[in-house]
Every structure is written in C-alpha cells, then in structure tokens.
Image (cartoon, grey):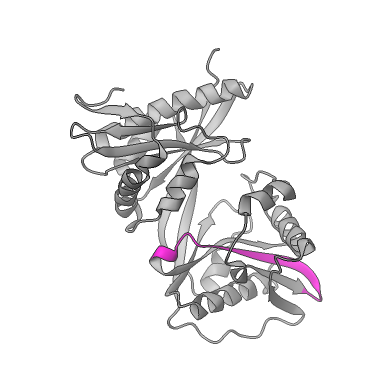
Amino acid sequence: MTLPAGWTTRRPTLDDVPAILAVVHAADTFAIGHPDFDAEDVTASLTANHFDPTRDSWLAIDPDDTVVGWATVDNPSGVGREFVEVYVEPVRAAAVRAPLLVRQLDRVAERAAERGLPSLTVRCAVFAPERDWEQTVRGLGFARVKRYVRMSRPLDDLPDEPAAPAGVTVRQVRPDHETDLVEFHRIYEAAFGDTRDHEPLSYERWRARIGDLTAWDEWFVAEVDGVPVGALQSSDQAIDQQSGWVKTLSVLSAYRRRGVGAALLRRAFARYAEKGRKSAGLGVDLTNPTAPLSLYRSVGLRETHWTDMYERSVPAARV
C-alpha cells in the first residue's frame, strides 16, 4: 500500500507533540465523541520503555506540510504482545491509515527478530464508528478476539454510601507503607491471573511503572475480617472529561460475590464526587471470566460505547 501522491512520512520528535496531539484529538472525537489524550500522554508514548521513535513510529504529512497521521507501537513491558495504534485526521487523512499500519506490521516483524522470537502477536483497536478501519484490519489478516465496553454513571445524584457488608472494611491505600503496596500488587496479580490476556508483572516492575502518584487518595484496599482481599486502582485518564476513572478492580476469587467489589466502587465514587468530578467510569473486558457487568450495573454504571480488539500473528523478519 502506498501513500497518496504528494503525501510523505517522517519520524516524530518531541517537537511534534502539539501536532500529534491535534491529530489524536480529532481521531478520538470521531471514535468516542471526545478527546482521550493529553500532551503528557503523547510525550510518555514517545519516551516509553522499549520504544524508539526513530524506528517504531511514523508521522504522515500532507502536501501542505501538516501532520495528519501518527503510527506507534506500544509495549512498555518489552514482553508479550505488541499493540499498534494508528491515528489519523478522520476525514482528510483516512487514505494514509492503511499504509501506516502496513509499515507498523513490518516494524513488528523486525522487533520479533530482534527479540529472537519466531513471531509476535499484534493487536489493533476498532471503535464503533470506524467501519472502514475495521475492513482495513480484517483485510490485513486481523481477526476480532474481544470486545471492551466503557461504562459510566453521573455523580450528581450519587446516593449516600451504604454500610459495607458485615466484616468488610474499605480504606485508602497507604503509599508510605511498602507492605501495603506489596499486598495491593499481590491481590491484583492473583485476581487477574485467570484472565486470558494477563501478563504477570513483578512487584518491582509494577512499582516502577506506577511511579510517584499524586492521587493515592483514590486507591483503596478492602479487607474482610482484617485480611486484605480487594484493591481498586484509579487513573487520571478521564480528568479532562471531569470524570473519575477506575483503572482496575481486583477481588480475590474466594471473596467474590460478597459485596467487596461494590464496596470498593462506592468508596471510589464518593471520593470522585468529593473532588468535584461529574461522573465515574471504567472499561470492561467482556471475556473476563468473572462476568462483572452485573456488579457494575448494580452500582449505577451503564454502557456508553464499545471497542473491539483485533489480533494477528506477525512472523519475524528474516535477518
């Protein structure tokens, strides 16, 4: 696949962050109705571990020398599958999305060879309005493997937080207690260990990834009779929409369906409301064996839109 006549590509630098952000905002607004990225996210992507912007990313440039597309590979752990994202200005630059994806697949083949692997699994996301993009990824050998649903609820009518079930207490995580963070990580790893796509992460790597947060007051631990059994991690990814965001909700299997998850969610919603957030949201993997939709609906969350994940295997390039 080739670019339209007069269009070019080049590698991005940090000087391109504003231009890239404009493209991503246009793409996100088309796909989900609002921007879902900020300048810090773009910078983090261009400086991520196991990512070289001189090899792993492209910009598409139109004949007026305007950046209208950005392709990137995401794999901050350096293990497991690769995730390819291709953002374009949705109308004017739609024709460059497929060529950029082909270039990224070629790069994934090189990355497989560099890691000494016979192949790598690569994934791409398709949002509900992106019917042409869906046909593109299918045509390049991708198949749908799962669907994520985004759920949300308003916080202006949040009822008073009910009492937790007998024996269940919810408290804020204590970031200055290393043992508290170790327990948080242990619960997360154990709770997600039975999901299809879970890639185990050591405590040291997990701790390095989360870095120094400023919103620890939005992280919670649930205990049953004094034993830590549940954990909720928040993220600031939806602050631009004045929304609190639940990044992960983890409950040990022996304590599920006992009100632990609901108690954690209600505490998080209350904290978001205290901070003036207008809504709360999270994403749900519909292949999750715990089938959490009923839990989320029970605390007032409702589906707003979906994302399909497509996947294919890319053979390693011959060296």
Residue 303 seen anywhere in this rendered image of the structure: no
Residue 46 location in percent, x, y? 47, 40
Residue 154 location in percent, x, y? 43, 75
Magenta stretch containing residue 126, yes or no? no
Task: Using the rendered view, name the quadrant where residue 255 is placed.
Answer: bottom right
Is 202 situated left or right of 234 in this image?
A: right
Give above or below for 308 relative to 153: above
Instruction: Report the number of discs.
Output: 0
Furthest-top residue in view? 319
Q: Residue at x 41, y 41 (%)?
A: 14
Is 197 situated left or right of 132 in this image?
A: right
Is 129 situated left or right of 157 in this image?
A: left
Magenta stretch containing residue 229, yes or no? yes
- Which segment did they paint magenta? 224-240
Is 17 situated left or right of 287 in this image?
A: left
Q: Residue at x 47, y 59 (%)?
A: 237
Residue 267 location in percent, x, y? 60, 76
Residue sitting nearer the eye, 204 or 261 = 204
Q: Residue at x 61, y 85 (%)?
A: 162
Indicate the quadrant containing the C terminus: top left, top right, bottom left or bottom right: top right
Residue 183 seen anywhere in this rendered image of the structure: yes
Indicate the quadrant containing the N terminus: top left, top right, bottom left or bottom right: top left
Residue 179 location in percent, x, y? 79, 62
Task: Using the rendered view, name the quadrant where residue 293 is placed.
Answer: bottom right
Furthest-front residue in view? 15
